[in-house]
Every structure is written in structure tokens, then in C-alpha cells.
Image: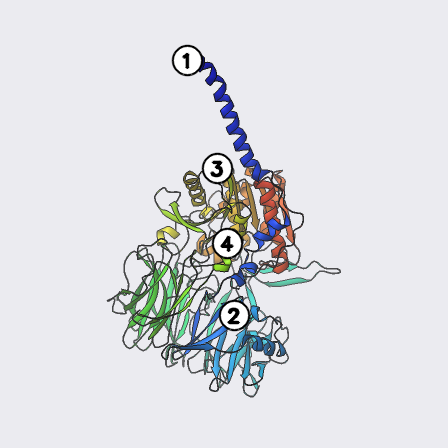
Amino acid sequence: MNLKLWPRVFSHVIPVTAAFAWIAISLSLQAQTGRIYTSDDYSRAANLLNAGTFSLVDHAIRHATFMGGDRFWYLDSENGLATLMVADAARRTKSAGYDPIRMAAALHAAGLGETDPKRIRPEQFDLLDDDRSTLITISGVRYRCALGVEYRCSVELSGPTGTAKPSLSDASLADFSPDGKRAVFLRDWNLWVREIATGAEKQLTTDGVKDYGYATDNAGWIHSEHAIVVWSPDSKKLATFQQDQRKTGEMYTVSSRIGHPHLETWKYPLVGDKDVTMIERVIIDVDRAKVTRLKMPPDQHRSTLCDHLVCHAGWEDVQWAADGKTLAFVSTSRDHKVETVRIADVASGAVRDVFTETASTFFDSGYDHVNWRYLSRRNEILWFSQRENWGNLYLYDAATGKLKHAVTQGDWNVDEVLHVDQETGEMILTGTGREPSEDPYYRRIYSTNLDGKNLKLLSTEDADHVATVSRDGKFIIDIYSTPQEPQIMLLRDGSGQKIEELAHGDITRLKAAGWIAPETFHVKGHDGKTDVYGLLFRPANLDVSQKYPIIDFIYPGPQGGSFGTHGFQASRLDSNALAQLGFAVVQIEGMGNPRRSKAFQDEYLKDIGINAIPDQISGIRELEQRYSWIDLDRVGMWGHSGGGNATVATMLRYPDFVKVGIAESGNHENRNYEDDWDEKWVGLVQTKADGTTNYDSQANASYAANLKGKLMLAHGMLDDNVPVSTSMLLIDALVKANKDFALIIFPQAHHAYGPTASAYMMRRRWDYFVTELMKATPPHEFAMPPVLPATQ
């Protein structure tokens, strides 16, 4: 070949090569963007929702419960059927507690609406009469069942007679005494007690009136007819309160129906209200129906942990002495900065302050559980605090209020106090962040002593450990897992020594259905220094030569993050399903969330409106550098409640990043949300000289003119948690700014939409991402299967 021709050859070859490359890229993108999705495509994705994966995981046990002594029970599922197993830790035996099919029939005959044994999941269980009968609680209703030749069940508490407004099953509203012989309930703003054996009822309080009743379960965002009480250990007394809501503002929802609408009204204090709900603490002697008021001013309706008196395991901020003569409790200031530990004399009602802790931002007594303990036999208080930037335990003298010493120390967090032996001082607890780990949120099991010595790691597996301890501390049930591997259940002794493996999760059938394990990753937060962790769900049938849109599921906290659990979960909402449709999906635990350092959680307190959001952006950008198949020009985001708020905030305050967002039931205007949550994280309302407040920057409506991407809003008209007005104010601002958006309103839905509306919302969410982010065509009106709770 004439070498002089090479320049001319290249002049033609290079453009042709570039053209072929462009065509290849275009065809690669067209394989997604021009795609027409079928019902079969959606069906395969829907199989990876909780309704589909529920029966595909075998022996992945979530929790176990000791029944007293050495026996415990747990649910072991195979092919979707859960068998309640009863095990004896000392004897090393286990057997089925009952036949699930026969039990389902007996429960249905006793009034349980559910007939499918695969859908019956007991919440409490105990064996009686030498295992010939059982007490079993399902959906809050307690049944007594005979386990003879024929199974026969009856409701243990048939319900108080003459109830004015039974909004739920009365049996589910009863609070049983420790000895199981009595139950208290509310009637006409007063407390009553029923003797289980005879059905005899007695009125315990008489001066409760509307909006000034006893034991009222109303935090505004949540409200029920359940009584909030703490029984004394001997089942003779109650610690509770008379709740004053007479000056508290009201909230309203209006039904959509033929004819005159129904107006529901209840007390719902808002941020900045002069008058909010207060409680007046009382002790009730059940036998004598005598009320003793504690000698102290009314207290704020606040807890040391969450935005209600009741968080996860009852009213944990009120704890009885073993002998029932004194009562320890914590008073929390309105802004959650000041905590005062107090002890009351039950007989006289006299109250003394033990000690006070003041936080510069906010105080938490734990994460999912209140971690302080009244050690009455030792006359001590075990106290949880993040005063040294990490969640550690401290021991106080309950008589003098003086700090004795730190029980745990260092740059790690006590997650939950599981067991304290007041005689020996031996403790068992879970903690996070102390051991080298793939994920610093993994919980590990430790033992230590109240003297602050001999801290010992009991679980070496690099996984998330859920532990249950026997009452005497001799046995530990350890259930551990990762997002990739299902639960393994071990029986350990109190020193952590493995005794035996009780169950081993099997996901063979789940994988056969197309499930792909998410990948745990870490990237730098927005500060460029701090590691933040996440899960990545790769697109099904990934071709690294293609580009895939990425969807970020967000829940910003600051009381919790996007993961939910760092252990195994077959379905994480619809992240697995969206990946099956061809999207990359991420969940990122941004800064501003708990279970790391206090400074980590405090990161965004000056502007909670962008909590965790900059870390989503920096994290996705880093992932795009790591994986060439992530398309940074096609970023989607969605979330519910706080996640709905965060989705809109991202699109309005960082308008060039997210191209398609779906915001469900978001608290877009926190001045229209309940007082407790916001005043803890944002602070009390402060009005500046120019008339603006510290809440202005939290309002998404203030940034409506910035919208560039495609936005879908959704809200339930009967939402009694996040009022629909928070979305309506945003909608009004978008209209005034002449911005396009999509809107779905559910006339009959509350904050959680319910099975029908949730399935519809999920289908519309898929359609919107497929249409607007993938630039493809979804199947017409695909019939989505029921959306089941994650606990199923």
C-alpha cells in the first residue's frame, strides 16, 4: 500500500468508526429508552415485592421471645407457612407449639377475620395448664385456646360493655396486668378495670372529662382509644396521667362521600403553639380505686426518645421499683434539651429530683429503645448519654444524684441494654461501631459489668445481631444476618459460648425467582471526609456497556434512615422490583441520622430541610465514577413522609440533579406538622428582627420557582399524621410559579395508604419512572398485587 494514502484512509476510517460507536451507543440506550414494557415484565418485578418474596424464604427467623424460665418461642416458616416453635434452652428441645392449620380454624371460629394460616402471625404467646392451653395475641386481641383433641379458642377479654365509641376491637385496647388477672381500658375519658375471671368491672377514675381524660393516647400525629399505663410488678397499682388538651389546637379531616361529609376532629398541637398538650402524673391503687397525684407541676407531653410518650416498647420513661414503693421517671423539656430524672414516693405522691442533663442540641436516651434503667435494688440509675459524642452508659447514685462512673466508654454506641443483674452487676447489651466491620451499623452483642470493667464481645460474626436474653441472663438467642445473607439463629450461653444452631435461613427459591442481593457500599459524604453507607441494587441483566438510570429511595431522618434494617430483608419496599425493571437503585444513610456519632446526627440541625440530601448527591456522583453504567443524567428519587419532603427539597434546592421525583405524603411545611417532632429537631420557633423565622428554610413552597424536573405529588385526604395541607401549600406555590407537576389524591387514605391505594401508588410510581426517567412505555393499567407490610 502506498504509504502516502494513509492520511486519506484515516480521514475516512476515523469518522466511520466514530459513527459506528455513536450508533452502538444509541442502540444501547434505545434498548432501554425505546422499550415497551409488558405485563409479564411488571409481573416478574412484582414477584420481588414482599407479597411475592414472603413465601420464598425458609427458616429466616426474625425474633424470639422468652416465655419465662428457659423456654422461648419463635416462628419458623417453610413454604410460607409459619409454625410456632417452643424451645427449652436448658433441655435443648424444641417442638411445634400447636398445629397452625387447626389453630387458624379455631381462631376464625372465635372471631378472627383471617382464615389463611400463612397470614396469621402471633405477637404474644404463652403456654398454660401443662401445655394443654395457650394465650395467644393476634392483631392486639388476646385469645385463650384449648389444645386438646379439638382446638377451641375464645377471646380472653370480650370487651367492656356500654363502650361509647368502640373504634377498634375492645380486646385489643385492653392493657393486661403482669399476673394476667386484670385489664384496664378507657371509657368516657376515665379508666376502668375488668377482672378477667368474673368479667366484673370497676371504675378507677371519675373526674375525667372531654380533652382532660386519663391515660389518653394522643400525640396528635397518632391517636387511639388505647390506655397508656404502666402496671406495678405486683399488679396492684398503675402509673399513668391525666392529659390536659383543653387548650390544644385541633386538626380536621373531611371524608369524601355522597351526602354531607363527615368531619373528624382531634387535638393536634402545632409547632410554635402557645398551648400544647400537658400531662399530670398520677398513681392509681387498683383495689381501692384511689388516685394519688404526684406533687409536681404539669409535665410536657414528651419522651426521652421519640415524639410520643410511647415509643417502641410501651411507656419506657416510667419505671417501677421492684417493691412497688417508688417510681422513677424522666421529665423532658418541650425542646428536648433538658432531661430531669425524678423519683416519686408512691404512697404520698412526693417527688424529688435526682439529677438533670442538658444537651446543647437535643437529647436521646437510645435509638429504637429507651436505655436508662431504675436499678431500685441497688438504689442506682443506669443512664444513657451522648455527652462525649457517642452513646455510652453512666451510673448514678439514685439517693444523691451524683455520678459514680462511666459504665461504657469510647467511640462507639450502646444500642440496647438487654439485661442487668442487679445482684452481680453483670450486663448484656448490643452496640454498634466498636469493631472493624463492613457496615458500622451492624449490632454486636457484648457483656460487661456495672463497675465499668470487663467489656467482652460475645458475637464475632460481621453481621447485624438481634438478641434476646433470658430473665436470669443464662441464655442468649442470637439472630444474625446481613443484607445479602438470611438470618442464622444461635443459642448461646450467658458468656457468649455457642450452644447450638437452631435455624439457618434458606433463600434458594428466592434467588431462583430472580432476586439479586443488594451490595453494601460506602462513599464520602458531602464534606469529602466522612464515610456514609448505602445499598446498591444493580439492574437485572446488567450490561456494563449500557447506561442505566438510577433511582434513590430516601428517608432522611433525622430519627432514622433509608435502610430500615441493616440485616436481611427479602424485599426493601420496591427497590428489588425497580432493579428488575432495569433501574439501578440506591439507599444511602446520609449524615444527619442516628447510630453514628452525635456530631454525625447533628450535621444538619441548622437547616433540617436538607437533612441527608447533600450526601445523596455526593454519594451518587461517586458511584457514577465507580460504575460507568450509571447514568448521572437520569437520576430519579422517591420517598414517603419525610422521604416525600426530602424528594421535593432535593428537586427544588438542587434543581439540576434529580430529573424525576415522586413525593408521597411529605411534610413539606413543618409549621403545619406536630409540635413534638419539629421542636426537637428544628427547635422552638424563633422570630428574627425582619419577621422571618428559623422555620422558613424548611418550607418547600419557598423554593417552588426552582422546579425543573418532572415531579409527582401524592397525599391521602384523611392523613392524620402529616396533614394534607402540607402538600396543598406546596401545590399552591407551584401553581403560582406556573410549574407543571403530576398529582395523585387518595380520598379515603390515611398516612399509610392501605392495601388498595398502596398497590395503585406503586403501579403509578413504576409507570412514572418508566415513562419519564427511562423514556419507555409501561403496560396499561397493570394490576399490582397487594402491598404487604415489611414485617410479613
Image location (x, y in percent) of residue 721: 56, 59
In primary-sequence order, the first of circles 4 and 2 is 2
Q: Residues within 10 Å of mark 3 (few under 14, many from 20)?
A: few
Q: Vertical placement of 58 versus 436: above or below?
A: below
Residue designated by label 2: 82
Q: Which residue is mark 1?
A: 3
* Real-space Cα separation, disc 1 to disc 2, in angstroms: 78 Å
Disc 3 and disc 1 in contact, CB within 8 angstroms:
no
Residue 545: image tag: 3
Disc 1 residue type (three-letter): Leu
- Which residue is more in the foreground, 148 or 218? 148
| Picture quadrant where residue 463 is located | bottom left
Give the number of the disc on residue 515. Answer: 4
> Rounded to the nearest whole Å, what is the CA distance between mark 3 and mark 1?
35 Å
The percent coordinates of residue 422 (x first, y second) are: 30, 75
Q: Residue at x 58, y 38 (%)?
A: 33
Residue 372 visible in the shown view: no
Residue 678 shown left or right of residue 459 in the figure: right
Classed neighbour count for the residue bearing mark 2: other residues with Cα under 10 Å, few (<14), some (14–19), many (≥20):
many
Which of the labelled discs sits on residue 147, or is there none?
none
User: What is the distance, in whole Å, between disc 1 and disc 4 at their CAs?
Assistant: 57 Å
Residue 789 placement: quadrant: bottom right
Q: Secondary structure at mark 1?
A: helix
Residue sticking out furthest to the bottom: 198
Question: Secondary structure beneath disc 3?
Answer: loop
Q: Nearer the viewer, residue 330 or 707?
A: 707
For the residues labelled 3 and 4, the Cα–Cα distance comes to 22 Å
- Mark 2 to mark 3: distance in Å? 44 Å
